[in-house]
């Protein structure tokens, strides 16, 4: 109950990609209520006697909270994708974003595999963390258990302390589509269909960032303004 904006954050502090050093995010504005260490596990059209169009089931601190809202912005981001090749299922292989979230380093030299903007951003962020980055183009086999090397298509053998994969993220559309939002396959995943202001096929539901296949800050600002109108 209450008025204003509630931000439900799964981690113990907000920031998402910015917290991992992958982007810049402006500070939260005053007046935003923040619920950290919380996860929205269900999103429904509100059929209770409480006010609001939406009903959210939020898991927090061993409790399940019921939250009603007039409008909801889904900004669930995406999930790291694997790159299948022999040996990639062995210990010593990490998602690049997962490594950025680990306090300790897993070695000094990191073989980095991936493509696109995700490869560039993760490589830069991992370098700032102190890793020596070696790009592993066209990997054919990961070597060792745990992995300590990668054979490449050109015949080169790249030695490393660990292997990280930085493929474009697949949008986490489940919450939005479970309540009626539409999504489409873009070759990597299923971003939610939105207009220029983040509106979905559900009149009270908006989506922003990776889940909608859009830049986070610009689309989040547009969706926020539209949701408040």
Image (cartoon, helix red, strand yellow):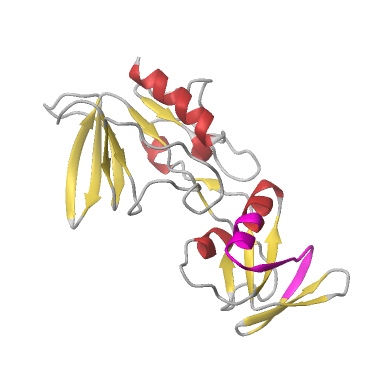
Give the residue drawn at x 38%, y 46%: 14
Give the residue drawn at x 62%, y 66%: 164
Say left or right for 156 vs 40: right
Residue occupying the far right of the picture: 154
* Residue 150 occupies quadrant: bottom right
Q: Note whether 73 is above or below 170 in the view shown.
A: above
Residue occupying the far bottom of the picture: 145
Say left or right for 98 vs 205: right
Magenta segment: 124-141
Say left or right for 112 vs 45: right
The spot of residue 61 in percent (x, y) is 20, 56
Residue 27 appears in the figure: yes
Looking at the picture, tell me which residue is in the foreground, 49 or 59: 59
> Which image quarter is the N terminus in?
top left
Whether residue 131 appears in magenta in the rendering, the answer is yes
Q: Note whether 10 is above or below 178 in the view shown.
A: below
The spot of residue 219 in percent (x, y) is 51, 29
The spot of residue 116 in percent (x, y) is 70, 48
Give the residue drawn at x 21%, y 24%: 52
> Which image quarter is the C terminus in?
top left
Q: Note whether 42 is above or below 149 in the view shown.
A: above
Looking at the picture, tell me which residue is in the foreground, 149 or 82: 149
Residue occupying the far top of the picture: 229
Residue 82 appears in the figure: no
């Amino acid at each position: 109950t209450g008025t204003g904006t509630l931000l439900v954050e799964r981690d113990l502090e907000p920031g998402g990609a910015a917290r991992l050093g992958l982007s810049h995010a402006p500070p939260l504005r005053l007046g935003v209520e923040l619920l950290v260490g919380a996860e929205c596990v269900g999103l429904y059209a509100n059929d209770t006697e409480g006010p609001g169009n939406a009903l959210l089931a939020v898991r927090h601190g061993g409790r399940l909270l019921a939250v009603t809202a007039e409008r909801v912005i889904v900004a669930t981001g995406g999930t790291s994708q694997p790159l299948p090749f022999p040996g990639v299922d062995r210990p010593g292989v990490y998602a690049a974003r997962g490594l950025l979230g680990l306090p300790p380093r897993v070695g000094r030299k990191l073989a980095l595999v991936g493509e696109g903007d995700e490869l560039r951003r993760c490589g830069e962020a991992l370098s700032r963390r102190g890793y020596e980055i070696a790009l592993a183009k066209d990997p054919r086999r990961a070597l060792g258990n745990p992995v300590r090397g990668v054979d490449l298509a050109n015949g080169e053998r790249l030695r490393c302390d660990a292997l990280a994969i930085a493929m474009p993220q697949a949008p986490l559309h489940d919450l939005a589509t479970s309540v009626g939002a539409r999504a489409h396959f873009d070759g990597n995943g299923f971003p939610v269909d939105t207009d220029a202001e983040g509106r979905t096929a559900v009149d009270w539901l908006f989506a922003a960032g990776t889940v909608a296949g859009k830049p986070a800050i610009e689309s989040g600002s547009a969706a926020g303004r539209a949701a408040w109108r």
